[in-house]
Image (cartoon, helix red, strand yellow):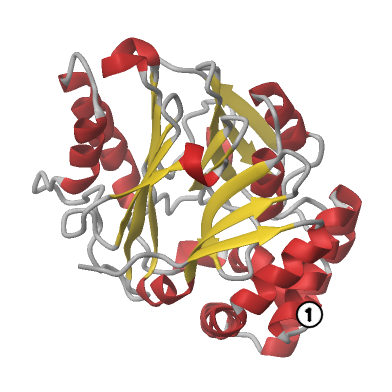
Amino acid sequence: MESKIPYIKVVGSYKERGFSHGSQCAEMIKKNIELCKSLCCILRKSSWEMLLRDTKRFVKSIRKYDLDLYIEMEAIAAGAGVTTEEIIFLNVHTELLNPIWNKASVNEGCTSIYVGRKRTAGNKIYLAQTWDWIHDFKEVLIILHSDDQEGHQFITITEAGIIGNMGINNKGIVVLLNFLPINELNVDGVPYHLLLRRVLESKTVLDAQCNVIRSPIAFALNIIVADSSDEVIDIELTAKGIDLHFPENDRLVHTNHLLSRRLKVREGKSTFESSVMRLETAIETLDEAEIIGIDHIKQLYSVHKKKAHEICSHLVGDIRSCTLFTVIFEQMEQELYISFGLPCENEFVKYDLKQLFN
């Protein structure tokens, strides 16, 4: 049984929340910097000085897109006792690794789902996903609860020092994400962790969509955004275009390959081998049940069907990736469930969001 992910609450202005994040997570942030530095230097076969040089190329687009988030990252650095460039590096390290991923032995990835009211017991709305990443990074995971004291709060499950990931806010907005292996990078675009953070600060799905598309993205990503009124959209984002998808049979499923025919031509040759299989498994499992409840969602992520590539991913590849955690959001009752570690071996811990957001 894995232990819980540390729960970190930050309150106040962007600067105050950043400093609190940094000071509460100082050692974890330093560990995360070392892990990311080692990973990037090995896979890119480059020096730390070269990584910092490339990190600085994103500063202009970050400041242009959202100066407040840049100020928050500066404050995280101050609180943790590291440099601003190191915190920016954490928030852009995925972009720095593109397209190196296509040369690495990474065959697993995240599986995201949405199930609407028409398919669920009690008219509930479920959004869920796995987070598959390198095993060592489990040591720097946090649950970050941010409260601006002006009526807006959000919770994101992220790594120490990173300002936005999948999560939910007190307006009912949920965002999920999936990496897309496309060999395109726009250094004038916005790193995806900042886009996710702005989605978490949105009030409606339309507001979130505007926050996503008002600036080009640096790197390919899929996001699913939904609210408590059961409005939902799936957005495939690349450096050179986007496409939208909507529910079929009141459910959405996405893994780590493009579903858009229009964008498909941009996809890399080394699309994760497991992606199509995980997509099919998730759709089949959801469609086997007439009425879906929380136990169906847990089972989807926990049960092994003895296929070549499972949704619950054990250690694989030369960089030792696996499922680090699985998260389920239920919007109507405002409940959050997290399984830290492999969901086939670890129970889901329930969090009452109504109480946390009170």
Looking at the image, residue 99 lies above or below residue 38: above
Looking at the image, residue 104 lies above or below residue 14: below
* Identity of the residue drawn at 17% across and 19% down: 289
Front residue of 107 and 287? 287
Query: Quarter holding the C terminus?
Result: top right
Residue 318 on image: x %, y %: 33, 76
Q: Would residue 116 be visible to someone looking at this image?
A: yes
Q: Which residue is mark 1?
A: 78
Residue 8 on image: x %, y %: 55, 64
- Count the marks: 1
Q: Would residue 61 be visible to someone looking at this image?
A: no
Residue 112 on image: x %, y %: 40, 39
* Identity of the residue drawn at 40% across and 23% down: 125
Q: Is residue 86 left or right of residue 35?
A: right
- Quick one: SS at disc 1? helix
Residue most toward the left? 306
Dot 1 surroundings within 10 Å: few (below 14), some, or many (20 or more)? many
Query: Quarter holding the N terminus?
Result: bottom left
Residue 222 on image: x %, y %: 54, 40
Looking at the image, residue 219 lies above or below residue 116: below
* Tag 1: amino acid: Ala
Q: Quadrant of residue 108?
A: bottom left
